[in-house]
Image (cartoon, helix red, strand yellow):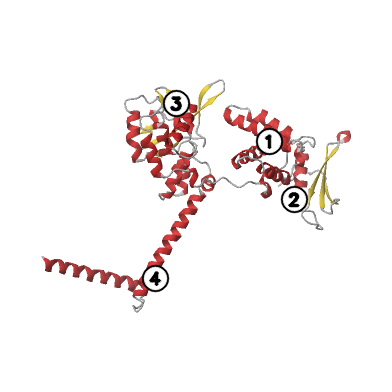
Amino acid sequence: MYHGVMPAGHIQKRRNGDGSVSWRVSVPVGYGRHAARIVRCVRAERDTKNPSKTATELLARLQRQAEGGVVPSHKLTIGDLLERWLAEWVADDERYEQASQAAYRSAVALYLKPSIGHIRAMSLQPAHVAEMWRNVRALPRALESVRRYYATLHLALEWGIGQGLVLRNVCDADVAKLPGKHHDESDVLSLMQMLAMLDRVKGTEMALPVLIGISAGCRRGEAIGVKVGNVDVIGKRLQIARSLRRQKGAGIVEKQPKGGKPRVVPIPEFALPAFTAACDGKPDSWYVCGDGPEPMPPERVSKGWRALLDTLDLPPLRFHDLRHSYATALLEAGADMKTVQELLGHTQMSTTADIYSHVTERMRERSIAALNEAASQAAEHLGRTSSAKVLPAKQAEEHEIAASSTRSRRSSAGRAHHS
């Protein structure tokens, strides 16, 4: 709780030209001839006697920021904020891969700045963002592209909050959110399809990357980063200790897996022979995928994967979808969500649960179908024995044991008679 002296401030009701109501929030900053005021307006959903919760929370935030000397610039535009985010945060090779940096720059240049770059950062409202999504969805762009724009803006605004450039992330408002990405059946291969793919790629350079993707749920960079020393064929364990990526000016570089730490996954029985053959007699420092001490380049995996899809006449899947296929197969085989989270290396359970919610929903439907079938069979049996006396649970159990014993004696006597 704040115990200091808060700067003064007030909230005043204003009526707009269209008849709606806004709350004018004002907080003084600075002293003497450098004094000024931060003035923000919050549109109210309805006309009330007292200020809205949004207005009072905004007043409190502005007061705390004015007291701490962090006053967001009223002149800063969203375009300015995005450019600063790209230059000061994204352009860090240790933080983001070159491909990710290029994707963020593209999203900012091609759509975010042209759409909302002119709006002052402190004036950006959820309605602005919602309208932007409606406009972009009307264009011939895939929903996945729109999600990338959303993720880019969300990250930039979160960074802006930390820098004191904006007060809130409007992307978090319900009206500005996009539907989450869920992988349906068209995004994954069945277990039979995966095993058939392994059989088809035997003897090719894609055999080992595909094997690691299917048997361990690895990302592309993690798959080509596996070394012989990470494979324990005796203990049937595979350590995912690193991820490889190509960095501009530095070639292929090594980093931690995406979750920030190594993980260990069991090796399925069907994958053991291939891992054994791939590692037999080789130094621990050699890469499983690649030419001895040199790893397989990531772009070669991508090129080989595209050629493989054409050969097998499969839908346009990504190499990353082997990871989703692995997780889906685990869940359908009865693995719990916590185990799948750990095997995939997700830092949060919510990530796993959100991505694979369609699998658990399908499993629930199957469980209900099984229950319905069992109930139908029980009802049919009850109909045939409707004259039977319904016994308490304990007596019913004793009755069933006695009946089973009688049936056993009769069976024994029948076998003795025939012999």
Looking at the image, can residue 264 be seen?
Answer: no
User: Which class describes the residues within 10 Å of circle 2: few (<14), some (14-19), or many (20+)?
Assistant: few
Residue type at mark 4: give it: Ala
Q: Which residue is mark 2?
A: 54
Looking at the image, can residue 281 be seen?
Answer: yes
Q: Is residue 348 left or right of residue 14?
A: left
Q: Are marks 2 and 3 in contact (CB under 8 Å)?
A: no
Pinpoint residue 53: horizontal percent, then vertical percent.
75, 53
Residue type at mark 3: give it: Met
> Of the numbered discs in the image, which one, if any, rests on residue 379?
4
Q: CA distance from mark 1 to mark 4?
A: 61 Å
| Quarter location, residue 114 | top right
Residue type at mark 2: give it: Thr
**In this view of the protein, which residue sits in the foreground, 14 or 217?**
217
> Of the numbered discs in the image, which one, if any, rests on residue 390?
none
Callout 3 secondary element: loop
Q: Quadrant of the C terminus?
A: bottom left
Q: Earlier in the sequence, mark 3 or mark 4?
A: 3
Q: Residue drawn 42% across and 46% down?
A: 330
Q: Earlier in the sequence, mark 2 or mark 1?
A: 2
> Of the numbered discs in the image, which one, if any, rests on residue 111?
1
